[in-house]
Image (cartoon, helix red, strand yellow):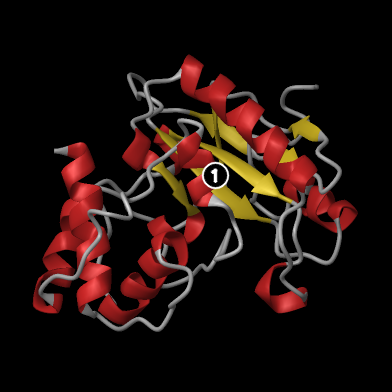
Amino acid sequence: MPSNFSSNFDTRPAGTVVDMLIFHYTGMEDRESALERLCDPSSNVSAHYLIGEDGSVEALVAEKHRAWHAGEAAWRGQSDINARSIGIELVNPGHEFGYRPFTESQMLSVEILAREILDRHPIPARNVVGHSDVAPRRKTDPGELFDWRRLAERGIGLWPDEGAAGSGEAEDTANLLIQYGYEIMDLPMTIAAFQRHFRPSRIDGVADGKTAGVLRALLSMIA
């Protein structure tokens, strides 16, 4: 796999530790269009890796460099998310062009690549996130069809203990989201982003007791 196939990258700030892994979908009609955009110097967009629906993996930017995939984003009080993260794009039309499940071949490649990345960098499980987690006011990818639970079962990211995820006081939701890592400039959109990741059966942006319960279960896993 070639490194720096895309010219859209720059140098990470000195002393920066890579401690985040961010998943995206391409949100374009096909792989070729996505690859062209990720490598077009005028787009100012890139990612470290692109995973096709056939499971193929292309390295577009070397991990030592900062790829431009997160944009305006925040996580756990930090805002230069590109500087501290690895970005993986998965070919999928996304919500605009006909969102569909990720293929088994893609998910197998995700597992292998993500484990290799986690072996190379000190990325805590709570920092394995989606684009919508770090940019809830702008993004919905990789979306509710991305199998976060499957990855967590393989040591990639977190998934709440179903038994521990009871109901809680919904009034605490904003504070719980902040504790976990989210920014809440638009609380309903942040709740929807959280639900898209951890409660995909209900994505309505409403702070209910079950959502609060899932948040508490997650926080208990990182305490």
Q: Residue furthest top?
A: 120
Query: From this viewpoint, is residue 49 visible?
Result: no
Decide if residue 35 is on the left or right side of residue 89. Answer: right
Where is residue 7 shown, x and y percent of the image? 72, 35
Q: Nearer the viewer, residue 199 or 179?
A: 199
Q: Nearer the viewer, residue 180 or 58?
A: 180
Q: Residue at point 77% right, 51% down? A: 103
Q: Is residue 33 left or right of residue 39?
A: right
Tell me if I can see residue 25 in this picture. Answer: yes
| Residue 181, percent from left and from top | 25, 52
Asked if residue 176 is positioned above or below residue 20 in the image, the reply reads below
Inspect the image, locate mark 1, and give the three-letter code of the amino acid beneath it. Arg
The relative height of residue 141 versus residue 107 in the rendered view (above or below) is below
Residue in the image at 62% along x and 41% along y: 88
SS at circle 1: helix
Quarter of the picture holding the C terminus = top left
Tell me where residue 61 sits by quadrant: top right
| Residue at the limit of the structure toward the front, as seen here | 163
Q: Is residue 49 left or right of residue 105?
A: left
Residue under pointer 1? 150
Picture coordinates of residue 142 (x, y %)? 58, 58
Residue at figure coordinates x 46%, y 67% from the top left? 196
Which quarter of the figure is the N terminus placed in?
top right
Dividing the picture into quadrants, the one containing residue 167 is bottom left
Taking the view exactly as shown, the residue that stands out farthest to the right is 32
Q: Residues within 10 Å of mark 1 (few under 14, many from 20)?
A: some
Residue under the point 64% across and 50% down: 45
- Count of numbered tags: 1
Q: Is residue 77 above or below residue 207?
A: above
Q: Is residue 131 above or below residue 193?
A: above
Which x, y percent locates residue 71?
49, 55
